[in-house]
Image: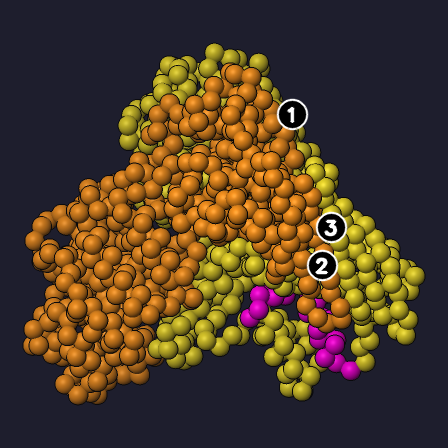
Chain colours: A yellow, B orange
Amino acid sequence: MSKIGDYQNVIKIYDTTLRDGTQGAGVCLSADDKVKIALRLDKMGFHYIEGGWPGSNPKDMEFFKRIKQHQLKHSVITAFGSTCRPGVAPAEDVNLNSLLEAGVQATAIFGKAWDFHVTKALNTTLEENLRMVRESVAYLKRHGLTVFFDAEHFFDGFKANAAYALSVLRAAAQAGADALVLCDTNGGSLPQEIYEAVTRVAQEMPGLELGIHAHNDGEMAVANTIMAVQAGVTQVQGTVNGLGERCGNANLCSVIPNLTFKMGYQTVPRENLVYLTELSRYVYEQANLSPVANQPYVGESAFAHKGGMHVSALLKEHGTYEHLAPELVGNTRRVLMSELAGISNLLYKYKELNLDKNSPEGRQVLEQLKNLEHRGYQFEAAEGSLELMLRKAMNGYQEPFQLASMRLILEMREQQPIHSEAVIKLRVGDEVVHTAAEGNGPVNALDNALRKALETFYPEVAKMRLSDYKVRVLEEKVGTEAQVRVLIETGNGQKTWGTVGVSTNIIEASWQALADSMAYGLLPENKI
Amino acid sequence: MSKIGDYQNVIKIYDTTLRDGTQGAGVCLSADDKVKIALRLDKMGFHYIEGGWPGSNPKDMEFFKRIKQHQLKHSVITAFGSTCRPGVAPAEDVNLNSLLEAGVQATAIFGKAWDFHVTKALNTTLEENLRMVRESVAYLKRHGLTVFFDAEHFFDGFKANAAYALSVLRAAAQAGADALVLCDTNGGSLPQEIYEAVTRVAQEMPGLELGIHAHNDGEMAVANTIMAVQAGVTQVQGTVNGLGERCGNANLCSVIPNLTFKMGYQTVPRENLVYLTELSRYVYEQANLSPVANQPYVGESAFAHKGGMHVSALLKEHGTYEHLAPELVGNTRRVLMSELAGISNLLYKYKELNLDKNSPEGRQVLEQLKNLEHRGYQFEAAEGSLELMLRKAMNGYQEPFQLASMRLILEMREQQPIHSEAVIKLRVGDEVVHTAAEGNGPVNALDNALRKALETFYPEVAKMRLSDYKVRVLEEKVGTEAQVRVLIETGNGQKTWGTVGVSTNIIEASWQALADSMAYGLLPENKI
């Protein structure tokens, strides 16, 4: 782990996707989602992961409990909170004490740096606010914690009353804060203002570690972050994909490659940046948000070329119309009008299965794949379905079962819960099995009936567990008639695999993904 | 109409939504769409509207023909093209002549400013490129046109070979160009680089009008545009919503309010900026794209507040957590409900409905809300359900209908599609209605049956349309038995509202959200 101040040219990445990111409209992560994302961030080599605000809700406290069961390689988990309240001593402050209860090594606490906020929002005096900052930082330091002080509204405060804003920073510094993080909380500052204010702070407080926390309300969070680094900050706060309240936080998926490739700073290990695109999409998936196609660096269209002239120049020399080689951030070049998506992935799979891409079977699968992707299938998280498709194209694959018929009946009377029943008829080899099951909802009933039908033939089905079930409405405009994509993740204790189904009917899409998940688990090499 | 150089502090807005904007993946505008958008841009007071590249496709030529039938108030229509080709005289160049045929007063032609591009992409000499620039500008000037020279890749060229990049600008200036537009074509430049390069150009070529054309590949197009203005440019090019190739162009919906409200420049008439949000959504609609909720200034969530602490401060003073009053750009403040929200978010809603928070009803709703949120309900996108809950707690609310029973039957045989049928029995006042409908999937069948049952009693149901249907699996660990949340958005042509349902059964969750969506639309004040 990098320690503070170890290297001159290291910019430390402080991620707040799990805290400030969840303030975004429509962003909601369970404690479990948060753990999964934290493990990815650690793998990328982020320096700090702000896990939540333990004082504000039980879900965040749950995260801090669960993440302790994991050994992290790179990241320090931090807990977020505020200074003590006016008129309250730190030791008596519930919120501050919950930071101690979170059991972390590092904390970030925010305090007001804008005089207007102290008097208007906090309803207290400027002097009392300094006391709160000073004593809160000192209290946490006495408990052996690393303490970052987030100076809320610093830039607005600096414009309104620079002397007071600086005195707040000084109070935190004198109490032992490990870094002073300058926050553009309302997100409306201009790059030049940020540069000048940070320059002044760096002059007034030499030798102190400074950080930047920018919001995107003026569409300049990334630029403001870069300018702050140029003026001397060494810790940058932000979120994956720029998730966050209102217009979001500084987008780390842009900040990191800008700092690394364009400005030559050390951020996360350079070789990890090839996973940046994957990280971006992973976080979108976990938050159940649609990826933004034109997002810089990691978007599906970030390196998509449409203009014929650009394309012909690109064929000669990639640098002509690309600011960066897409491979550096794990993205790919796309030439629109020729749907090339997924082919490189596919060629890789071909290799694994010894399938010749120029054979009739090879070409048939390629055509089929293009068709399915066009209809909304997505194989990135569904390698199980992809491999089954390849195997079906090759000789010698025998489907373990086929659906003859299926019926689902759901009934509800008055305020009673819905009763769900599935009736299913399968062909397994030469035999026919006809059975029924109930369930908690239609998909669960179907899942139960399918397992019941298969268990006599394939006892290993009992070991397979669905670990994830995701639904995404593809074209939201069409209401309840829209195309729906279902992604299912299944595990058998040794490995996990994803499968996919797409239909305007959620039951049909679920059936496709369910059937694939069983068929893939029954491949000879997956038996345990 | 503003003329070039009329005022010291005017920044001229040059829109290229209709040309560069259509290079974006998935952006496709008919000649008719383009005319409609151009009329809106004119009404807003944009100075220039780049209508297309008449030499490149017949659709663009069609636009120039049609737009002439309209009397524009503010905007000058410009046509885009390139310099003549290597070894060709301007008078012989088809592309240049098509600019004359477009019948416009103003043109923008691009030429190469990066030596690498001249030799690699154009395959010609540096001297020949200067000839092409000089003669092309002079040719169009001789035909009485305003000529803007777009220096393609200027910033990359300036970094690689400043002397040559400047000599290209000089060639255009000496031939009579009315403005020199510095283009960051690959979109990878940093704000400080832009500032320094523009400063140098302004020093070398005093008295010349300069422009900026920025792309967003480093997520800094807006900031780069602002920095260029600070260094002396007076024409800014960009697109509505930042549409454009790859990661898009500088977003005028952010550039304009930044320049106007934060930097004090004259751009479009200030009073027109209240239509900015409407313009943004209009362009999304015409391009058939979903609006970006967290887009700065004009996004649905740009002024949405979720954190309880923020909301309690906002109630005291709007400026505390807003960088700008949303009314200035025609947007509105939203208060989101969620588990992060303290009580204050709800109090904001109470105020709207004149409900006393200390009354038994007020406290009852608060308890109910906490319970529901704990179970996975999310009210931030479901204000309809929230308001129904508040009204149910208040006296005098009469439910428009109640469910007596419901049955759904889904059947599939062999490879046939699933057949979905819903049977529904409702109580409406003293009457009972019992009916059935088919649909494309279970939820659609249920939706159809519900509408059919209600239409005789409430004909306005026919005007309500589901515009969005979202499914989120809440606790993914449990597979197909997981809790599911359904969010539905409904509109009646005048307003739209969101409703929510949560259950382990997707059908039950969908039913709750569907029933709420109808009940909310049937409130007396929502009738149209």
Report which quarter residue A380 is drawn in.
Answer: bottom right
Amino acid type at mark 2: Leu
Residue A305 as seen in the image, left or right of residue A16: left
What span is in magenta?
A374-395
Image height check: is B172 above or below A210? below
Q: Nearer the viewer, residue A390 or A269?
A: A390
Q: N-terminal of the two: label 3 or label 1?
A: 1
Mark 2 falls on what kind of element? strand
Q: Image height check: is A156 above or below A400?
A: above
- Give the residue at x 71% y 75%: A390
**Mark 3 touches mark 1? (CB < 8 Å):** no
Residue drawn at 66 percent across, 45 percent down: B425
Element at label 1: helix
Q: Give, as a three-letter code, the residue at label 3.
A: Leu
Q: Chain of mark 3?
A: A
Residue B78, given in percent of the width and then of the height, sits at 19, 67
Label 1 sits on residue: A101
The residue at 11%/55% (across/down) is: B2
Q: Is residue A381 magenta?
A: yes
- Bin the neighbour count of mark 3 within 10 Å (Cα to Cα): few under 14, some 14-19, many 20 and up: many
Mark 1: amino acid: Glu
